[in-house]
Amino acid sequence: MDQFIVKPLFGDGPVHWYTVTNVTLWMAISIVVLLGLFVLATRHRGIIPSRLQSVAELFYGFIHNMVEEVTGHEGAKFFPYVMTLFMFIFLANMLGLIPMSFTTTSHIAVTAVLAVTVFLTVTLVGLYRKGIGFLGMFWVSSAPLVLRPVLAVIEVISYFVRPLSHSIRLGGNLMAGHAVIKVFAGFAGAMGVASVVPIVAIAAIYGLETLVAAVQAYVFTILTCVYLRDAVGEAHH
């Protein structure tokens, strides 16, 4: 698990909240790549798009359609936030697959901040737009009256557990995949001629991890859209 250790970039002292670490470095790289992608893609916009512009438009259209389909017309106002969230997670996941890099989204400290931000956004927007009526999402009106108080308690608990599940799902999947690759790499170094077997397994797992990196960014984002729908749309039970 040493690949997940947070280390200062300068010196070997303790890590404080202001210390520049390998985590902050690779988060900064993700942001630079994100800005570079869209700045370069939109610098020379044309009716016939360049390859880079086509990539940017592909991401734009994909996320915009997802936001509109899940949250509705009112939720489309949050498209810039959702787009930024998806691109940051997606790029952080992909950059973490580069040898000798650091997967920032494998740390709960990073994913928890993203999840809590989503939770606070949904809660504050819901209270602002619906007032006390926002609490109606916890009251399952379609259930028998005797069960409604019990279901309301369950709904409240599940609502406040969202940041935990939202963050652990992303961080846990990435950490597990990278740990498995490291285990097989250890086998490859100890099996001599037979190391071709774990090397082939590493290649296969690496391909799977590339898919997981994209899917987990999508899952985190679409769950964000589902939560936003609770704040801007009608309650669904």
Image (spheres, rainbow, N blue to C red):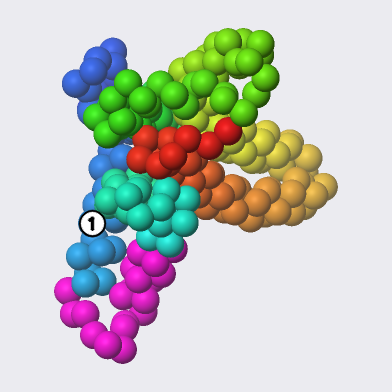
Query: Can residue 45 be found in the magenta stretch?
Result: yes
The residue at 40%/21% (across/down) is: 135
Most extreme residue toward the bottom, as rendered?
Answer: 48
The residue at 67%/19% (across/down) is: 144
Q: Which corner quadrant holds the C terminus?
A: top right
Assign a secondary structure to mark 1: helix
Residue 89, percent across and down? 41, 45
Asked if residue 194 is positioned above or below residue 173 in the image, the reply reads below
Residue 25, percent across and down? 28, 38
The residue at 47%/41% (across/down) is: 226
Amino acid type assigned to the residue bearing label 1 in the image: Leu
Q: Is residue 144 visible?
A: yes
Question: Which class describes the residues within 10 Å of circle 1: few (<14), some (14-19), or many (20+)?
Answer: some
Number of numbered labels in the structure image = 1
Q: Quadrant of residue 53?
A: bottom left
107 or 197, nearer to the observer: 107
62 or 75, nearer to the observer: 75
The residue singled out by tag 1 in the image is 35
Q: Is residue 206 left or right of residue 27?
A: right
Query: Can residue 23 be found in the magenta stretch?
Result: no
Most extreme residue toward the front, as rendered?
Answer: 145
Q: Is residue 82 left or right of residue 97?
A: left
169 or 69, nearer to the observer: 69
Asked if residue 202 is positioned above or below residue 112 in the image, the reply reads below
Q: Quadrant of residue 101?
A: top left
Q: Is residue 116 visible?
A: no
The residue at 36%/25% (across/down) is: 133
53 or 26, nearer to the observer: 53
Q: Is residue 235 left or right of residue 55?
A: right
Residue 171, percent across and down? 51, 31
Write the start and end of the magenta stretch as one range. 43-62
Residue 208, percent across and down? 65, 51
